[in-house]
Amino acid sequence: MTHSLTFDAISEATPGPKWTARWQRSWPAYEAWFVARGGDTGPDRAACETALRDYMPELVPVHAELTKLAGGSDRAARFLSTWCPPSYLGGCSLAVATSHDDIRLVRNYDLSPDLNEGLLLHSAWTGRRVMGMVEFLWGLSDGINDAGLSIALAYGGRQETGRGFGITTILRYVLETCETVPQALRALQRVPSHMPYNVVVADASGAAASVEIYAGGGAKVQPKLVATNHQTDGSTPDRGAFTQTFERSEHLNAVLSDGAAPSTLVGRFKHAPLKQDRYAEGFGTLFTAEYEPKRRCMTLHWEGAIWAQSLDTFEEGTRNIQYGEAAVGWPHHAGGIDWVKIGMEYAAGRQPDWRSFVPDWGNVA
């Protein structure tokens, strides 16, 4: 069975009708996930907005405007704050290659095609131009700003949680408020994440860093400019053998040790063990993103296709990408939930009967 994912490139300087259309399309499924994973038992709206004001005050007006466009409900406000959200999984491989005149940050995004928004958004919500791949309707899994600062995340390997924000909102914050790697590191160390993640950053000066971020706060810079799905604190990653996180990390270290030119790094991500094709198991490479901080541009790569974009000459458009076998709805290892059907129930004004959608209800990860 093949599966497809439509990628949209959208430019909207301030939140408006284009973002609202994405909210209306995606919110039913996100709301279903949020409710099912206990989002309504988390912090109330006041606590969420206070946390945002304490840690990321520059985003408070953006959050308020997005909440207004989303209808203004308490649930929407809490979801968009991403303060102490439900846990979620992911994959991904990251690396940065540098030379005396070039620097490239490259990432593979590994997940089920059913669980990615496929949205490349170009915006200027706080006055600074930012473009990147959207998650949770306004956060970013990776991106670049008009100073050339680039950033990307990888799941840290375990579902430990603490008091903090969803990492995609933190990445948005970094790109909205920082220009250099040192500034980004200070922000990552100051703003707590709710789960462990690995993040790489690079800037137009040629500086770069790989950072382990811990649940509830704290960050540690790593010696190698790579990241996969485990950390160096002695913890054992979830599904380490399944995701081949150690093999991918060793491969990337070898690539960088061999002195790979920055312009050739992306080619290494298009082959095993970095490229994943287990779409039916919820773990396939959905896209490879290549960021060039000095040129303030990015390129999305798929098998047989590329899509180049620049902050200065961004072009809206659509690409439909075909993949191999893919799971329908949530991948089996996370409970077999069909979020599409659940979203349709919400859209029709009905409260889903969760047990009819989740046969192994007691084992949802």
Image (spheres, rainbow, N blue to C red):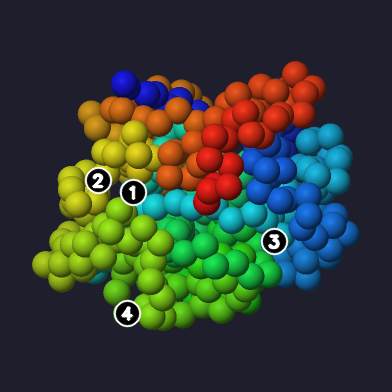
- Find the residue positioned furthest to the top: 348
Give the residue at x 77% y 58%. Answer: 42
* Residue highlighted by disc 3: 84
Locate residue 220, reporting x and y percent. Answer: 46, 80
Residue closer to the observer: 129 or 361: 361
Q: CA distance from mark 3 to mark 2?
A: 32 Å
* Residue highlighted by disc 2: 275
Residue 7 lies left or right of residue 34; in this view the side is left
- Circle 2 — which element? loop
The answer to whether residue 259 is above or below residue 23 is: below
State which tag comes first along the sequence, 2 or 4.
4
Residue closer to the observer: 92 or 147: 92
Q: Mark 2 Cα within 10 Å, few/some/many (few <14, many 20+)? A: many
State which tag comes first along the sequence, 3 or 4.
3
Asked if the residue under mark 2 is in contact with the one under mark 3, i.e. CB atoms within 8 Å, the reply is no
* Residue highlighted by disc 4: 223
Locate residue 144, reporting x and y percent. Answer: 48, 53
Q: CA distance from mark 2 to mark 1?
A: 7 Å
- Circle 4 — which element? loop
- Circle 1 — which element? strand
